[in-house]
Image (cartoon, rainbow, N blue to C red):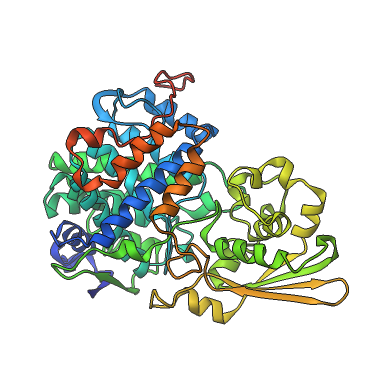
């Protein structure tokens, strides 16, 4: 691996496209490097993970609405929509839309944190949708998804979006596009052009994750996936895109990131290097923002030392800069302390999450977020006793360059009314690859079964799991069946403008 120096160039410099970041990303994605068995197996885990969290969200309003929109765009071959029979196909960009929202809705799939934030499994829905539409094999899907992961993680390692209040789909969109280019066997030139278009339209603000967080948080990665498919189609037809999208005088870097004098180092694989970045990512055992995962596990442990929650006087949480300012009291968001807040806001409130986890010594993707649960008077009292603080040790661990050392936890002080202080700390969530109980295949399967048990039959669960676990061997026909059927109607009930 080598670092690519990214900086702004004046227009008169006429920077060659082969020296631009978008070209380097497309080139890296399309490099026919060998794939390790570990990376392949992890991608299968993430496909299973995506399917489970998507099915568990099928009845939520945002997911229903996205699905209703997709149902208005039937296409005889098309892609398959989660929850519907595999007999029905729909236009792939709308399948990417519907399935992308379903995967993202519960904030319960994989994560990668470095200079910026990401959910790399958001790459899978648009690639799977187009793979089914264009009749690709499981092996082709696998290569495309691992390439998307590689591009995504390179960007997340190299460029911080958050400090400029840019939403993290700015890195997801180009990754999805690169994966689609690999899937279709496009040239570097075509993929480069499509990638630039998506970067151009996916630089949006982080207001989607600030204050009263709405359902757009789930729609945002579906939007970038839909844009990626449309950009790929446009590039296939020979159209060009804004260039150079990263390095130009009026580019995203010059105008929306660190400015015309800035420099970034973006890690790029050498030719022939294995695409293993997926192995640096991690999934969630609990349905909440990833930076809260270790604190949920820690709350379960600390609960055993507390006889009466009402005897707690104050709780101080010491953690990283990002955690304090994104999901802690450092955010300055009063909504994160409000029982009237949306679920999307509550799952980004470390104070609420720690309070409920401490009280219940358990966590549930639905029960922990109900209005009844968030409005309990005793919960509100505890919630408002919690403050977060940045501590340098945890910021350094959060940004550690060595993935074996990187950690996203913190320490907690619980001060009791009798003067006793209960302390605890945890570097990583138990499910993290370097945690106490790292997730393995059976954990992903168990999570899938738990999340889908009220929606699908045991026979359907086994059918899907058997297909997913044999991904590399799936034929074009088999890949059409890689979808969980939950008996939903293929007829749209709600009417919009379509």
> Does any portion of residue 203 appear in the rendered image?
no
Relative horizontal placement of residue 371, taking residue 293 as reference (left or right): right
Report the side of 91 relative to 63 (left or right): left
The reply, left or right, for residue 380 in relation to residue 277 is right
Camera-side residue: 401 or 357?
Answer: 357
**Which quadrant of the rendered structure holds the N terminus?**
bottom left
Q: Is residue 81 above or below residue 275?
A: above
**Residue 140 seen:** yes
* Residue 204 percent location from the top left of the image: 43, 51
Provide residue 99's location: percent of width, then percent of height: 39, 38
72 sits to left or right of 192 = right
Please state the horizontal and vertical placement of residue 34, each as a whole percent of the image.
Answer: 15, 62
Question: Where residue 219 sits: x, y (%)?
Answer: 45, 42
Which residue is drawn at the image coordinates 61% and 45% (left, top)? 343
Question: At x 39% / y 74%, what residue is drawn?
Answer: 403
Q: In the rendered view of the protein, which quadrant contains the C terminus?
A: top left
The residue closer to the viewer here, 253 or 302, is 302
Farthest residue to the bottom: give it: 393
């Amino acid at each position: 691996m080598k670092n690519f120096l990214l900086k702004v160039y004046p227009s008169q410099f006429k920077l060659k496209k082969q020296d631009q970041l978008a070209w380097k990303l497309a080139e890296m994605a399309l490099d026919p490097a060998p794939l390790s068995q570990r990376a392949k197996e992890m991608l299968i885990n993430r496909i299973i993970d995506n399917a489970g969290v998507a099915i568990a969200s099928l009845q939520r309003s945002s997911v229903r609405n996205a699905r209703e929109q997709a149902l208005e765009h039937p296409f005889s071959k098309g892609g398959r929509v989660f929850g519907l029979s595999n007999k029905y196909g729909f236009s792939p960009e709308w399948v990417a839309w519907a399935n992308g929202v379903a995967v993202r809705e519960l904030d319960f799939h994989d994560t990668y944190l470095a200079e910026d934030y990401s959910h790399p499994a958001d790459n899978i829905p648009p690639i799977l949708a187009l793979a089914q539409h264009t009749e690709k094999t499981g092996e082709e899907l696998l290569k495309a998804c691992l390439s998307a992961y590689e591009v995504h993680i390179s960007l997340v390692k190299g460029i911080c979006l958050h400090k400029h209040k840019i939403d993290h789909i700015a890195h997801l969109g180009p990754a999805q596009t690169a994966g689609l280019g690999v899937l279709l066997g496009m040239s570097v030139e075509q993929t480069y052009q499509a990638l630039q278009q998506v970067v151009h339209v996916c630089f949006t603000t982080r207001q989607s994750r600030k204050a009263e967080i709405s359902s757009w948080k789930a729609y945002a990665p579906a939007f970038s996936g839909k844009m990626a498919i449309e950009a790929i189609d446009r590039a296939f037809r020979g159209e060009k895109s804004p260039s150079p999208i990263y390095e130009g005088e009026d580019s995203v870097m010059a105008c929306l990131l660190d400015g015309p004098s800035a420099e970034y180092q973006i890690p790029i694989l050498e030719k022939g290097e294995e695409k293993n970045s997926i192995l640096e990512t991690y999934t969630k055992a609990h349905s909440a923002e990833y930076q809260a995962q270790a604190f949920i596990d820690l709350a379960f442990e600390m609960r055993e030392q507390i006889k009466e929650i009402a005897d707690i006087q104050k709780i101080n949480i010491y953690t990283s800069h990002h955690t304090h300012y994104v999901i802690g009291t450092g955010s300055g968001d009063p909504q994160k302390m409000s029982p009237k807040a949306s679920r999307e806001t509550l799952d980004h409130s470390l104070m609420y999450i720690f309070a409920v986890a401490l009280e219940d010594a358990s966590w549930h993707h639905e029960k922990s977020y109900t209005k009844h649960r968030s409005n309990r008077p005793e919960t509100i009292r505890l919630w408002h006793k919690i403050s977060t603080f940045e501590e340098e040790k945890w910021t350094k661990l959060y940004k550690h360059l060595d993935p074996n050392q990187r950690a996203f936890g913190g320490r907690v002080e619980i001060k009791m009314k009798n003067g006793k202080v209960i302390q605890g700390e945890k570097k990583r969530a138990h499910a993290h690859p370097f945690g106490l109980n790292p997730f393995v295949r059976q954990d992903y399967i168990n999570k899938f079964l738990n999340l889908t048990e009220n929606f699908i039959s045991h026979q359907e669960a086994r059918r899907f799991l058997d297909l997913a676990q044999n991904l590399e061997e799936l034929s074009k026909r088999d890949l059409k069946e890689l979808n969980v059927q939950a008996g939903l109607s293929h007829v749209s009930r709600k009417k919009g403008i379509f």
